[in-house]
Image (tube, rainbow, N blue to C red):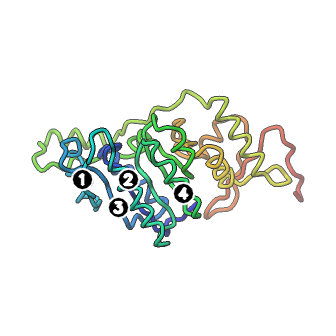
């Protein structure tokens, strides 16, 4: 959807995210573009945000103070939404990255997309469906944690703890993966291949991936234990995978049982 030269705005709901996902989050966002704006919102007078303070300078994330004016009401959401709209109207950003598991941001995501700007969402598995479907792509926190382990940046860490952290980095925990592709996932893959295929039945894998994202923004090969979409489709058992070219290789797929084109096709 976007390229690595795109300019992004990263907005984090500090009340609904953990600092443990920061390294994985920024690594993921780097594949979409450059986050020239990095802001995190919360009431920094409260102890529940203390964990964030150690990594904000490390990752150049700007904290935005928002006092809770009324008990039980989340003023942070309002501040994020206002800033997002201000940034949107500048016309400088190709995409917004919204980090939260709160359904209150569903309307914001929809409004940004109405402006023709891409929205990437990041949140927990419990994130309400309306927010997920309002995004162009949605990535779960546990997938980010599987790909990156947040380093221990405390100055008083002991050598033994550092060695343990190094060992953990060498063998990061894998994201919870489903035992196999379920019927719903296979049906979505079939629909995407069929919709993306040319007259000869071939479908470019990039187009298949884009169609899958349109069907379900949270469809991600990593949710099923695969590093790439190519690995997922090969393991699905319902498509044949073909590769051509050298740099880069072009990957196409076709549903199994479909007749292959002749020498001139």
Kindly identify which residue carries mark 3: 38
Is 180 drawn above or below residue 52 in the view shown? Answer: above
Return the disc, 4 or 2, that comes first in the chain's sequence.
2
Gap in Å between the C-alphas at discs 4 and 2? 15 Å
Disc 2 packing (10 Å; few <14; some 14–19; many ≥20): some
Q: Nearer the viewer, mark 3 or mark 2?
A: 2
Q: Eyeballing the image, is 108 above or below 231?
A: below
Q: Which mark is residue 111?
A: 4
Question: Crowding at label 4, few (<14), some or many (≥20) Cα neighbours within 10 Å?
Answer: some
Q: Earlier in the sequence, mark 3 or mark 2?
A: 3
Q: Secondary structure at mark 2?
A: helix
Mark seen at residue 78? 2
Q: Nearer the viewer, residue 196 or 80?
A: 80
Q: Earlier in the sequence, mark 2 or mark 1?
A: 1
Q: Residues within 10 Å of mark 3 (few under 14, many from 20)?
A: some
**Residue 130, horizontal then vertical, whole percent:** 54, 42
């Amino acid at each position: 959807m976007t390229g690595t030269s795109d300019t992004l705005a990263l907005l984090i709901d500090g009340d609904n995210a953990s600092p443990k996902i920061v390294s994985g989050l920024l690594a993921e966002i780097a594949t979409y573009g450059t986050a020239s704006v990095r802001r995190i919102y919360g009431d920094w007078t409260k102890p529940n945000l203390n964990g964030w303070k150690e990594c904000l300078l490390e990752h150049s994330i700007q904290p935005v103070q928002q006092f809770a004016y009324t008990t039980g009401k989340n003023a942070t959401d309002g501040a994020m939404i206002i800033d997002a709209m201000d940034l949107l109207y500048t016309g400088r950003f190709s995409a917004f990255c919204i980090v939260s598991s709160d359904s209150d941001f569903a309307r914001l995501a929809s409004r940004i997309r109405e402006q023709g700007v891409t929205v990437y969402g990041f949140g927990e598995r419990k994130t309400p469906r309306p927010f997920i479907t309002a995004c162009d792509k949605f990535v779960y926190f546990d997938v980010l944690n599987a790909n990156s382990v947040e380093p221990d940046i405390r100055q008083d860490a002991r050598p033994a703890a550092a060695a343990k952290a190094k060992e953990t980095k060498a063998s990061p925990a894998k994201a919870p993966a489903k035992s196999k592709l379920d019927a719903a996932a296979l049906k979505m893959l079939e629909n995407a291949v069929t919709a993306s295929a040319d007259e000869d039945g071939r479908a470019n894998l990039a187009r298949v991936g884009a169609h899958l994202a349109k069907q379900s923004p949270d469809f991600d090969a990593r949710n099923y234990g695969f590093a790439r979409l190519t690995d997922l489709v090969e393991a699905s058992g319902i498509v044949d995978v073909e590769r051509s070219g050298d740099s880069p290789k072009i990957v196409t797929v076709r549903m199994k049982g479909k007749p292959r084109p002749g020498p001139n096709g």
